Image (cartoon, helix red, strand yellow):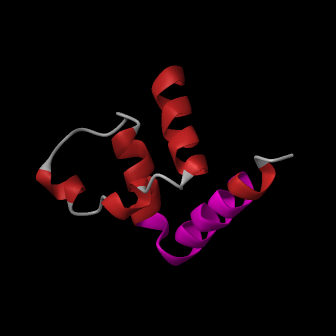
Amino acid sequence: MILMPLMFGSLMKLAKALVCEPTTTLTTILYYGNLLPRNLNLERLVRREFLHQENYFFHFLITMLRCVW
């Protein structure tokens, strides 16, 4: 129960980012999930501000992508 407000806030941040900037959000998730190659063209789309410590759901998605693929 104590983690619910933290995860809900993080989920809302991710949903807001997906609505406002869908391309950069998906590119950032795939880039840090090691599913996209490291090159300068893609680095322009990657947003490092999504990697904020309080963005738990974003980190969870990246970790799951790294484990699965």
Q: Is residue 11 magenta?
A: yes
Residue 33, placed above or below residue 12: above
Q: Is residue 42 left or right of residue 64?
A: left
The residue lying furthest to the left in this view is 40
Q: Would residue 69 be visible to someone looking at this image?
A: no
Choose top left, top right, bottom left or bottom right for residue 6.
bottom right
- Which region of the structure is painted magenta? 7-23
Q: Where is residue 19 shown, x and y percent of the image?
A: 58, 73
Magenta highlight: main SS: helix
Q: Is residue 6 visible?
A: yes
The residue lying at 31 percent from left, 40 percent from top is: 36
Among the 4 quarters of the image, the one containing residue 42: bottom left
- Give coordinates of residue 33: x percent, y percent: 41, 36
Q: Residue furthest front?
A: 2
Q: Is residue 56 left or right of residue 51?
A: right
The image position of residue 69, as x and y in percent, is 47, 23
User: Measuring 46% from the left and 52% from the top, which residue is drawn there?
Assistant: 53
Residue 14 coordinates in the image, percent (x, y): 58, 61
Which residue is the extreme one toward the bottom? 20
Residue found 56% across the figure and 41% down from its top: 61
Q: Nearer the viewer, residue 50 or 19?
A: 50
Q: Residue at x 53, y 55 (%)?
A: 54
40 to the left or right of 23: left
Note whether 26 is above or below 22 in the view shown. above
Q: Is residue 27 left or right of residue 15?
A: left
